[in-house]
Image (cartoon, rainbow, N blue to C red):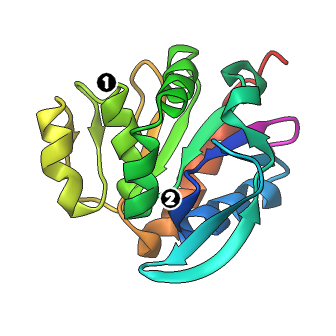
Amino acid sequence: MSLEGRTVAFLVAGEGIEQAELVEPWKAVLDAGGTPVLVSKDTGTVQAFNHLDRADTFDVDVTLADASPGDFDALMLPGGVANGDALRTQEDAVEFVTGIAEAGKPIGVICHGGWVLIEAALVGNRTLTSWPSLQTDYRNAGAHWIDREVVLDEGPFVLVSSRKPDDLPEFDKQFVSVLEATETADV
C-alpha cells in the first residue's frame, strides 16, 4: 500500500518547532506517496529550531482559518517546547485538533507537540509517550504515560506518540503504517 490520495496536516505554531520532528515525518509521508500540508495560524513562514538554535524557515501552506479537519486524512503534531506551548494557547488550533479527533482520524505526536492534545482534553484514558518532562501533565490529564520509543493507542482515534528526534525512524514507520490502513478524507 501507499499513501497516495492521503493528505496529512502538519500543525505548527509560528516558531519553536523542533526541525527534525517536522522534516523527517514530512519526508516519510512524501516518500510513501502522501501529501503533507503545513498548517499554522498565520500566513508566511514558520521558524524551526534545532533544540535552542534557529534552524530553517518553512512556508505555511494553509492557515488555520482556512483549514478544515475534513480536508485531511490525519494530523501530525511536531514537538519543540515553544511550538507546543504556543499551540495550546491558540483556540483555533485546539478546535482544529478536536475536529480531527472527533472525526476519528489518526494523530501523530512527538515530544512537546502533545500539549495541545491535553488542552483539547483528548488524552484521558489514552496510553502514550512524550519527552519525559510532560509525563506529569499527561498523567494529570488522565493519560497513562510510558517511556517508550513509540506508542500506538487505538482508542476513538489512533494516536501514535514518540519521545524525541532519536525515535523518529521507528515513529515514521509506525505513523505511515497507520496512515496506509486509513480511509481517505471526504474532500
Residue 114 horizontal side relative to residue 69, left or right:
left
Circle 2 sits on which residue?
171
Residue 41 horizontal side relative to residue 169, left or right:
right
Q: Which residues are magenta?
A: 1-7
Circle 1 sits on which residue?
121
Secondary structure category for the residue under label 2: helix
Residue 175 horizontal side relative to residue 71, left or right:
left
**The image quarter in which residue 52 lies:** bottom left
Question: Where is residue 116 drawn, in percent x and y?
Answer: 40, 38
Amino acid type of disc 1?
A: Ala
**The image quarter in which residue 39 lies:** top right
Question: Where is residue 80 drawn, in percent x and y?
Answer: 43, 63
Depth-wise, is mark 1 or mark 2 nearer the camera? 1
Question: Where is residue 101 drawn, in percent x and y?
Answer: 50, 22
Query: What secondary structure predominates along the stretch shown in magenta?
Result: loop
**In the figure, 40 relative to 156: above or below?**
below
Crowd around label 2: few <14 · some 14–19 · many ≥20 (10 Å): many
Residue 100 horizontal side relative to residue 69, left or right:
left
Secondary structure category for the residue under label 1: loop
Q: Is residue 82 magenta?
A: no
Question: Where is residue 187 drawn, in percent x and y?
Answer: 85, 18
Residue pictured at 46% horizontal, 56% vertical: 83
* Sequence-first disc among 1 and 2: 1
Residue pictured at 22% horizontal, 53% vertical: 134
